[in-house]
Amino acid sequence: TIGGDHPNASFVEECTEDLRGMAAELNKAIAADDIAVVRRIALQIRGVAAELGFGVIAESAESAINSVSLAMSVTEAATSVRSLISMCMRARAQEEGEKRRAG
C-alpha cells in the first residue's frame, strides 16, 4: 500500500488495476511456458512498482526476473513468478484498506 500523500497517489488506483492485468498476463505466460513473455512482464511490473513506491512488489519482480534469467523453463522459476502474481493481485491504495478497517 501507499499513502495518499505519495506524489503519484492520483494514479494508484489505475496502476493497481494495471498490475492486476499484468498478473493475469503472467498467468497466461506461465501456462504457455513462455519464458520471454514472463521476463518482459516482470520487467514492466518492476518499473511500475518502483515508480509508484511499491518497493516490495518491485523487489519481488526483481527476484522473478533473476529466477527466470537463470531458469531453462518457466516451471523452474514458477515459485518466484507466482509470488509476484500474488503481490500484484493484492496491490491497493492505503485509503482502500483504511476504509475496510473503519467500516
Image (tube, rainbow, N blue to C red):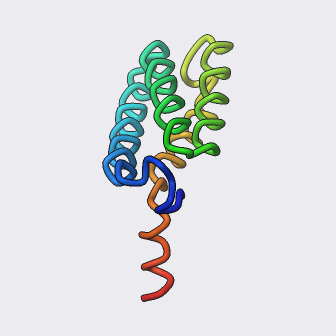
Residue 56 image position (x, y, % from top left): 64, 45
Q: Which residue, as the protein is rendered here, is positioned at the far bottom?
A: 103
Q: Is residue 74 above or below residue 13?
A: above
Q: Is residue 22 above or below residue 41?
A: below
Q: Is residue 70 shown left or right of residue 26? A: right
Count the numbered circles shown.
0
Residue 84 image position (x, y, % from top left): 55, 40
Residue 51 image position (x, y, % from top left): 51, 36
Name the residue at 67% across, 20% down.
66
Q: Is residue 5 above or below residue 31?
A: below
Residue 97 image position (x, y, % from top left): 48, 71
Q: Is residue 47 shown left or right of residue 13? A: right
Q: Is residue 76 shown left or right of residue 100? A: right
Name the residue at 50% across, 82% down.
101
- Observer-nearest of 95 and 6: 6
Q: Is residue 4 above or below residue 79?
A: below
- Quarter of the image containing the C terminus? bottom left
From this viewpoint, is residue 79 visible?
no
From this viewpoint, is residue 78 visible?
yes
Name the residue at 42% across, 69% down.
96
- Quarter of the image containing the N terminus? bottom right
